[in-house]
Amino acid sequence: MFLKRVLAHATSVAVGVYIGSQYYGTLFTPHHRHPLQDPSTIKQVSDEKDHGSQLSLTETIYQYLENQHDDLRWPKYNIHVEEAHNHEKNETFELFKTFNEFGLPTNVGQLNVFSRFLSVTDNRLKIPMFVCWSIPHFDNENYVEKSDRKFSKFMKSPIFEQLSSFNPDNTDYFGSKFSRGHLANCGDFTGFDQEAMNETHLLANNIVPQDYDNNANYWLRMERFTRSLADDFDVVHVIAGPVFMPRLYDNKQEPDAARPKAGPKGEVKYWIVGNNQVAVPTHLFRIIIAERSKTEIEEEESQRKSPQYYAQAFIVPNSQVDKFDHLTKYSISLKELEFLTGMRFLDKLEKSGKMNPLCCNNLAIDANIIRQEENPLKEPTSCACNCDLPPWQDIEFQTLLWNKNVTEKELTDKWESLLRETNWKPSKDIIRRRNSKLEELRNK
């Protein structure tokens, strides 16, 4: 009898979802389905609830996924949903739906759904494999901040509360000479509530050990470039994560008599920090997907309803980067990024025919997100903008804004000095930050 039961369930799949500390799941066979996933019983489940009540976020996601018949590669039911502090269920569901329709990175583990970002953690490396989030359109001049990172603190993930060996803490970073680097940068979350801001500080779900100079300079400029696109596009979607880049051997420059000719081609080396052995990535990647529903010339209503997407992938070393390096120096094709990470990206969006290259000034060989095999040096067509980082002077002035004891005179003198001596053209973002700080100082 036992053998019969085993054989009967040989094609079953164990699936479930974590909500808080509870696990809900079952064995699925073609004839055995959880009522929340069976389209024929969704209405029945809903009717069994109190009249006027709504499906939970978990149930909403399950219902949506069950009606998707195009792709079974993603482990759809291995999802953790943070319900407790989520007061914006509709926005969170739209975030999940958007990235699922793009094609979420595949070949990964449990997807953790937070109020404003999605994340998968590598339990062995103790860092996220990737993080996804969206930046809504905003006007720099009229932007209203709803949260502040000064009220947040870096903390252990509640998801791994019972799995302490997978859960890095702040002591892992103390004395490590690496900063706690956000993947979903908290600057993109100031327009959301404080709880969403707090979630960006979960170490296992959104933080990687990052070189201090890289975090405070070049990567910060990449973050601000990404956010600046939200001023011109309807919404900007981002996927970011770590890369562990192999170092390939060069037999001409590195002769090694002890290494046989048919031996290894290279090696992957990375540091670890803290007692929890948190892995330090060699590189960081960022995929930007800018969405635009309207064009300058619109003739048909159908054109307005079908958005176009402009995407570009970048990979930078997790170390100091020359401030004069152009951003497009670090562009990379999705195929190459998939090769390095072992994950697929945006495959559904690519198949839709709505994905265009973001950067018009990207002339690097094999750098376009869509390969141009015939003439890789040809300037991309149907592109959206020049991908230029904010001036390095923006960051130099920003360091002064971070100084709690800075005076109005110091700000004014530094501003005028940079304008006079470096031909600086301040970005809209730094102008807004400067004006906000000056107003704060004058109101003291």
Image (spheres, rainbow, N blue to C red):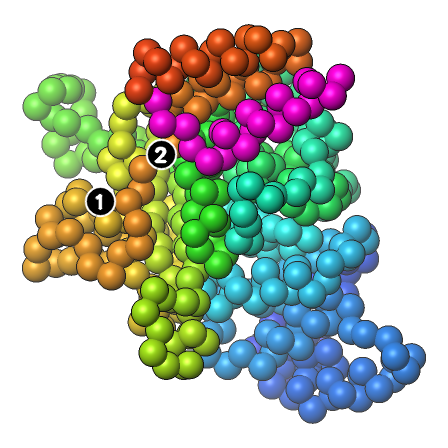
* Amino acid carrying mark 1 in the image: Asn
251 vs 295: above or below? above
Element on which disc 1 rests? loop
Horizontal and vertical percent for residue 399?
Answer: 52, 17
Residue 215 appears in the picture as rendered: yes
Q: Nearer the viewer, residue 226 or 376?
A: 226
Do the CB atoms of the residues marked 2 and 1 lie less than 8 Å apart? no
Mark 1 burial class by Cα count in 10 Å: few <14, some 14-19, many 20+: some
Instruction: Judge left or right: residue 415 versus residue 147.
Output: left
**Quadrant of the image for the N terminus?**
bottom right
Instruction: Judge left or right: residue 166 versus residue 55.
Output: left
Residue underneath mark 1: 361
Horizontal and vertical percent for residue 297?
Answer: 32, 69
* Amino acid carrying mark 2 in the image: Leu
Horizontal and vertical percent for residue 408?
Answer: 60, 12
The reply to whether the magenta stretch includes residue 433 is yes
Give the residue at x 80% y 88%: 44
Give the residue at x 55% y 41%: 141
The reply to whether the magenta stretch includes residue 251 is no
Mark 2 burial class by Cα count in 10 Å: few <14, some 14-19, many 20+: many
Residue 202 appears in the picture as rendered: no
Tell which circle, 2 or 1, labels the residue nearer the N-terminal end. Answer: 1
The residue segment tinted magenta is 424-444
Element on which disc 2 rests? loop
Q: Is the magenta stretch mostly helix, strand or loop?
A: helix
Q: Residue 389 carries which label?
A: 2
